[in-house]
Image (tube, rainbow, N blue to C red):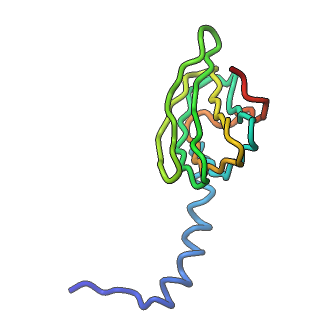
Amino acid sequence: MKTFLPVPTAVRIFPVVLALLLPLLVLAGTAQSNVYIRSGKQFLLGGGQHGAFEVTAKNVGFVAVEIKERPLRGDVIAKATLAPGQQGVLRFAAGSTGVFLNPHRFRAHLRVTLTGDTKQLRMDYEPVQE
């Protein structure tokens, strides 16, 4: 026979469990964030880090976001386009930069989770480049 905690007890325990697990997530190289990209801008993530990293991104905004990879050497690689409501998992090689483009008139909004070599990830914005 299964025993379930009453809802009020479960709700009281959840913050305690989260507080205990959060340091483990940070030590494991996981970070979560909301990313807002203004019209005509691109968000840059990474560049020069020693290891690879992975981005789980969910488009929670109203415009599509184009995602590319800018390796240390070589041409920029198109990876995906996330329409509003879509989610994707993208892997970026050591030293490369993830480029998240918003060529639309309205601000883009992504909810992202980063894993892998996240200790020295650079974050910046620049105008969309053709």
Residue positioned 63% across, 9% down in the render: 73
In this rendering, position of residue 114 left or right of residue 1: right
* Rendered location of residue 26, percent (x, y): 63, 50
Residue positioned 60% across, 8% down in the render: 74
* Rendered location of residue 110, percent (x, y): 62, 49
In the image, 5 versus 83, the foreground residue is 83
Q: Residue furthest top?
A: 74
Residue positioned 54% across, 71% down in the render: 17
Res. 57 image quadrant: top right
In the image, 87 versus 46, the foreground residue is 87
Q: Residue furthest front?
A: 105
- Quadrant housing the N terminus: bottom left
In the image, 23 versus 70, the foreground residue is 70
Q: Is residue 120 visible?
A: no
In the image, 84 versus 74, the foreground residue is 84
Q: Is residue 64 above or below residue 12?
A: above
Q: Residue furthest left?
A: 1
**Number of numbered labels in the structure image:** 0
Residue positioned 56% across, 41% down in the render: 115
Q: Is residue 94 visible?
A: yes
Res. 41 image quadrant: top right
* Rendered location of residue 117, percent (x, y): 60, 33
* Rendered location of residue 43, percent (x, y): 71, 36
- Quadrant housing the C terminus: top right
